[in-house]
Image (spheres, rainbow, N blue to C red):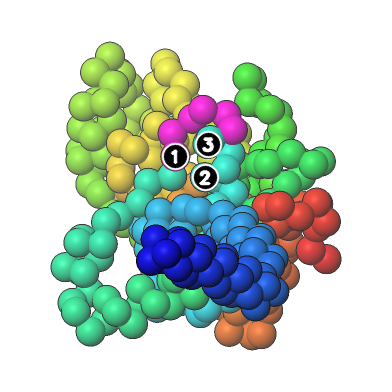
Amino acid sequence: MFFLIGAYYDNMIERIKTLLSLIIIIICLPYLVTFVVQGDFLGDMQDEETEEDKVDENTDELVLMLANEMPLTYEKEALKAQAVIARTNFFYAKEHDVAEPEHTTREKLREKLGGRDFQKYYEQLISCVEETAGEYVTCDEKVVQLPYHFVSAGKTRELAKTGKKKALPYLKTVPSVFDFRSEQFLNIGFLSKKQFRNKLRSAYPDLEFSEDDVEKMVSAIERDSASYVLTMQLPGQKITGEDFKEVFSLNSTCFSVKEVDGQVRIVTKGYGQGYGMSQFGANEMAKDGSSYEQILKYYYDGIEIQRKGNSTSKS
């Protein structure tokens, strides 16, 4: 009898447990469904944020490129223009398997600026990269390589087809009149005739100087449309303007050589190779209210500013 009552009791307890379990499941089911649905939704949102983050997955690298390429005290719109140039050249390097643009390191930048200035300028650089996130330059729907320089000689250079070099249609001659304001725009140096000859002989030992007249020693025989020297004639030898620039450590190949009062005077205009954006000119344009898009489209002809992950260009 006791065994029958105990078995009945146990059976009732099991039924009660089963019933309670069903009640708990019924009560919790809506919450469970909501959790699953929301979980998928949040997961989708997270995936979207991840894709957005990938627009500029090389932010740190681009910031350090920018720090290496342009004076940090320049106007923000000029720095943003340089940020787009850095990103474009980075993409071009990846696409064509060529050397990436050089960049500094955080440690070197901190050492150069000091703690307080480092934080201020680093945040400014991050802002410039983030505000142009994913933006790069194309011409004829292709990513291009964008040269730039510090100061032009009054106008930028056109890159026409010469020898094996292809013409680049987006590199046209444009005035850069603000560059006259730069301390680096004009450089005048003097050498004695002996110093001048010795420097040339150190680079070209076979030169024979039969004349003492400087303008017969060297003469520019070809200049481009922006007055940069392409080739020069030395006694019995032709060299490039770039070769002459290296021998005399000049700031650019826009130079002239003349004898003045028994000395050799070398006048150089501009700083850098003269192609593409003048950084000094860009900064002056930014001071006058130009946006980074306007600056880029002024110095590079017929370009479009694209955004990674977006097929439309910025007007």
> Residue tagged by mark 2?
90
| Cβ atoms under marks 1 and 3 closer than 8 Å | yes
> Residue tagged by mark 3?
93
| Cβ atoms under marks 1 and 2 closer than 8 Å | yes
Residue in view at x 68 percent, y 27 percent: 166
Q: What stretch is highlighted in magenta?
A: 95-100
Q: In this view, does 6 lie to the left or right of 297?
A: left
> Along the polypeptide, which appears first: circle 1 or circle 2?
2
Tell me which corner region of the image, top left, top right, bottom left or bottom right, holds residue 291.
bottom right
User: What is the three-letter code of the residue carrying label 2?
Assistant: Phe
User: What is the three-letter code of the residue carrying label 3?
Assistant: Ala
- Indicate the position of residue 221 as horizontal and vertical percent values: 57, 32
Q: How far apart are marks 1 and 3 (CA)?
A: 5 Å
Residue 98 appears in the picture as rendered: yes
Q: In this view, does 72 lie to the left or right of 173?
A: left
**Which quadrant would the C terminus be assigned to in this image?**
bottom right
- Indicate the position of residue 132 as horizontal and vertical percent values: 61, 66
Q: Is residue 191 left or right of residue 134?
A: left
User: What is the three-letter code of the residue carrying label 1?
Assistant: Glu
Secondary element type, mark 2 = helix
Give the label on residue 100, or none: 1
Residue in view at x 26 percent, y 39 percent: 196
Q: Distance between the residues labelled 3 and 2?
A: 5 Å
Q: How crowded is mark 1: few (under 14 residues within 10 Å), some or many (20 or more)?
A: some
- Indicate the position of residue 282 as horizontal and vertical percent values: 58, 70
> Along the polypeptide, which appears first: circle 1 or circle 3?
3
